Image (spheres, helix red, strand yellow):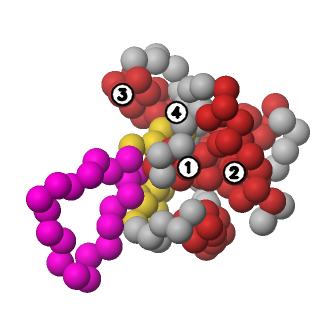
Amino acid sequence: MLEINNLTNRPLDEEFLNKVANKVLEEEKKDGVVSLVFVGPNRMRKMNYQYRKKNRVTDVLSFPEPPQKDFIAPPEAQKQLGEIVICPREVKKRAKREQSEFKKELARTLIHGLLHLLGYDHKKPKEAEIMLQKENKYLGYFF
């Protein structure tokens, strides 16, 4: 399940984003809540510097929820998987570079962020290959 907070002026297809997220979570056999936030380039640059020490705008940042030891959630509470922050302007720039449509690149970015929340990474070549295969598989359900 997605909790979407759009802090930009760009309208986004929330129904489509929910479908993409639900498909990935279903296929990965994970259940929980993901906070999805859309921000402008200035805020994204600040966050990228604050958390990664990179003074540039990026398209997506993912913040997995740390494990909650000794915390007993009420039965009705859903597990928090983490937060994904996306900069639509950067996604639009990548779509243009890739000669792709914005909606497709937005889905790819969301999938990428979700995979990070679920523990996937791309620091090593083998990890990057696995992550790319999964991104393409999930993107293929919609495009």
Task: Name the amino acid, label 3.
Answer: Tyr
User: What quarter of the picture does the C terminus occupy?
Assistant: bottom right
Q: Residue 51, labelled with which disc?
A: 3
Q: Which residues are magenta?
A: 64-83
Q: Residue 134, labelled with which disc?
A: 2
Label 4 or label 3, whichever comes before in sequence order: 4
Query: What is the quadrant of residue 120 in the picture?
Result: top right
Q: Residue 104, labelled with which disc?
A: none
- Which type of secondary structure does the marked residue at label 1 adopt? helix
Q: Nearer the viewer, mark 3 or mark 1?
A: 1
- Which type of secondary structure does the marked residue at label 3 adopt? helix
Q: Is residue 38 left or right of residue 27?
A: left
Confirm whether residue 17 shows in the render.
no
Give yes or no for contact between labels 1 and 2 (Cβ–Cβ under 8 Å).
Answer: yes
- Residue at horizontal 43 percent and vertical 27 percent from the top: 48
Label 1 or label 2, whichever comes before in sequence order: 1
- Which type of secondary structure does the marked residue at label 2 adopt? helix
Return the residue at label 4: 41
- Residue at horizontal 62 percent and vertical 52 percent from the top: 111
In the image, residue 107 lies at what x, y percent?
68, 55
